[in-house]
Amino acid sequence: MALLGRAALAMWWDIAAELRADFEDWHAHEHFPERLAIPGFRRGTRWSSTAGGEGMFVLYELEGHNTLASPAYLARLDAPTPWSTRLMPHHRNMVRSQCHVVASRGGVIARHAWSVRLSAVADRSAALQAYLGSLVATLPSRPGLVGAHLLRHEIPNIGTTREQQIRNNADRSADWVLVACGYAAPALEELGRFELSPAQLAEHGGAAEPVAALYSLAASAVGSDIE
């Protein structure tokens, strides 16, 4: 099964170890239900860094990119709960990409996810998209993998929200995101050494210094899972 919907919100941040338990309680029991109650939000999934660090990767699957500018979503962004208000200043190194789904094949919910964030060299965006799209078409059938998904960031036409202000307006974004999902960590790590290595990405139009990491599944839900 491919991503649910034609858009996605992909986010990465760090949470200090001493806040981890409080954060996971909030994210699973308040934030997921809040977001998944918004029309257009189809599924939310959180992965944690396999390196034992503070990194988080969260993916919301959306009906369409216009969900990111909908009145219902903006109302939540501008009225964070007390629990959200307390924790969001501790979302460090936030990267938040509001994406169209360019290509999606195979499963999303798997033991591990390998995410790559990158940009294209000027005038080579089409070449990069073609290369990454070809990977999405073939990776899901590889041993150890179950799915691959390509996303392209586009900023919705909205103003600065209260949640962004709480995070000191420090959110960054990634122009292109590829997420590979699988049950075998070595198969995903192999991608980082070969097809998704910085050198290979550069050969196909990627800009310098892509950011890649391996994550393990922490929680996932659709709206009907949460009352």
Image (cartoon, rainbow, N blue to C red):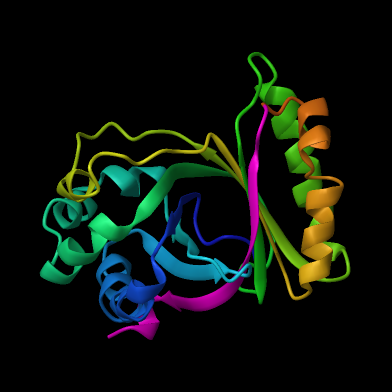
The main secondary structure of the magenta stretch is: strand
Residue at the spot 66% in from the left edge and 20% down from the top edge: 121
Q: Is residue 214 above or below residue 95?
A: below
Please state which of residues 145 and 212 is positioned toward the viewer in this rendering: 212
What segment carries the magenta color? 208-227
Q: Quadrant of residue 180?
A: bottom right
Residue at the spot 26% in from the left edge and 63% down from the top edge: 38
The spot of residue 132 in percent (x, y) is 74, 40
Residue at the spot 76% in from the left edge and 70% down from the top edge: 185
* Quadrant including the C terminus: bottom left
Q: Residue furthest front?
A: 18
Q: Is residue 168 above or below residue 127?
A: below
The spot of residue 34 in percent (x, y) is 25, 70
The answer to whether 67 appears left or right of 191 in the picture is left
Q: Residue furthest top?
A: 123
* Quadrant including the N terminus: bottom right
Q: Per the image, is 212 magenta?
A: yes
The answer to whether 173 appears left or right of 138 in the picture is left
The answer to whether 49 appears left or right of 212 in the picture is left
Please state which of residues 134 and 95 is positioned toward the viewer in this rendering: 95
- Give the total of numbered labels: 0
The spot of residue 166 in percent (x, y) is 18, 50
Q: Quadrant of residue 133?
A: top right
Residue at the spot 72% in from the left edge and 63% down from the top edge: 147
The spot of residue 63 in percent (x, y) is 42, 55
